Image: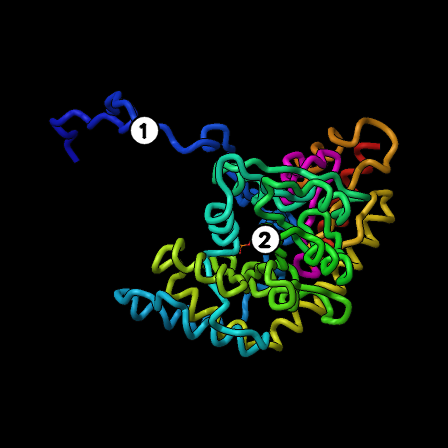
Amino acid sequence: MAPSAHPRPAAPEEHQAAARLPAPRPGIDGLQAYIGGESEAVANPRLGRPIRLASNEGALGMSPAAAAAYAAAGETLHRYPDGSAGALREAIAAVHRLDADRIVCGAGSDELIALLARAYAGPGDEVVHSAHGFLMYALAARGAGATAVSVPERRLTADVDAILAAVGPRTRLVFLANPNNPTGSLLAPEAVARLATALPDGVLLVVDAAYAEYLDDRDYEDGARLVAETGRVVMLRTFSKVFGLAALRLGWAYCPAAVADVLNRVRGPFNVTAAAQAAGVAAIADRDFVARARMHNAEWRAWTADGLSRLGLLVHPSAGNFVLVDFAGLAGADAASRAEAARLALKADGILVRQMGAYGLPGALRVSIGTAEEMVAVVDAFAAVLDRQA
Ligand SMILES: *Cc1c(COP(=O)(O)O)cnc(C)c1O
């Protein structure tokens, strides 16, 4: 082809006029964007593909019924979704025996975390979270202009008394992930109930149960019961983990009626896509898939924890689909530099795990539970790395 006679148009950044813009709301200027798990990777030589264990995605992929429902939704992309996500809320309500009117769906539970922060907290207000809690809580609080208050933990577990002591007249929201990501720690049902009951009026407790399906129902409090019993609890759930639908962005909240009403007014009218709603209805009905995923996770989480412990690494007990692996127990150079060196060596070997500096745990790595062959490969890779570090 002949070269064009026209000069190449300027790139947008060369082009930008210097207009004076409105300042963003308080809190936004200092905000760091959430950094997700890495996804670019080279192929692992043994498996011939990358091994992605940095984002706690479902090890077994997704339910075939959900994939089929998603494909079918592709036939009618010209139609707006059901703005109330009615069929999905009814399906969730039937499985969990909840009131569908008090379920609000979101584009991932991340959207619901942000909406709760924006709806209930602003400049001058405080949002309380535990020190190694899920990062989005502090980011959502700051994005709303509120102050995020980090509460020290005890042995990497949320401390109910310390949280209650941190709650003051400016507190609007308390976020608690149970189990917590990235530590994997779990609070007993009595502890969650005690927190919910002891909070003063005017404070909402958000129990984020993103990993609920990985637990046995016995001896686990996901927060649903406390929504009705206390009137000041919101439970969050997601389709991104055990259901394996992270790409679709789908989560839900179970709320007191007044909170559901607020969320329904502040959310976008079509915040959940039609494809996500259709896949969600199919996924939640596929109880066999969830049961298989739970059993796979229990088996390979134990196997992985055992294998990594034998290498001298400290593996924290986890109730989720991941383990937090601590280099602090090892002798030699400092834990943070050994953890980072290990992460980079694994990455060069086509294995992605999550660095934990942003969570205040620079000497640890978080490893998601993947397939059997992935976990065998990752334990072998850690062994090789530690051999070289020794
Ligand atoms: C993964 C995760 C979420 C985010 O879920 P999405 O529905 O994908 O936004 C929320 N809370 C915790 C604790 C998580 O680990």
Left or right, residue 65 beside residue 210: left
Type of residue at label 1? Pro
Q: Nearer the viewer, residue 23 or 335?
A: 23
Q: Is residue 341 visible?
A: yes
Label 1 to label 2: alpha-carbon separation? 32 Å
Left or right, residue 66 beside residue 217: left
Type of residue at label 2? Leu
Rendered position, 292 above or below 149: below
Q: Residues within 10 Å of mark 2 (few under 14, many from 20)?
A: many
In the drawing, what numbered circle is on residue 210? none
Q: Nearer the viewer, residue 7 or 56?
A: 56
Left or right, residue 304 beside residue 347: right
Which of the two discs, 1 and 2, labels the residue nearer the N terminus? 1
Residue at x 66% of width, y 45% of height: 133
| Disc 1, SS | loop
Quarter of the picture containing the N terminus is: top left
Q: Which residues are magenta?
A: 347-372
| Disc 2, SS | strand
Left or right, residue 156 beside residue 264: right
Asked if residue 97 lies in the magenta stretch, the reply is no
Q: Position of residue 376 (x, y in %)?
A: 74, 55
Q: Mark 2 — residue?
A: 204
Asked if residue 365 lies in the magenta stretch, the reply is yes
Residue at x 67% of width, y 52% of height: 199
In the drawing, what numbered circle is on residue 22? 1
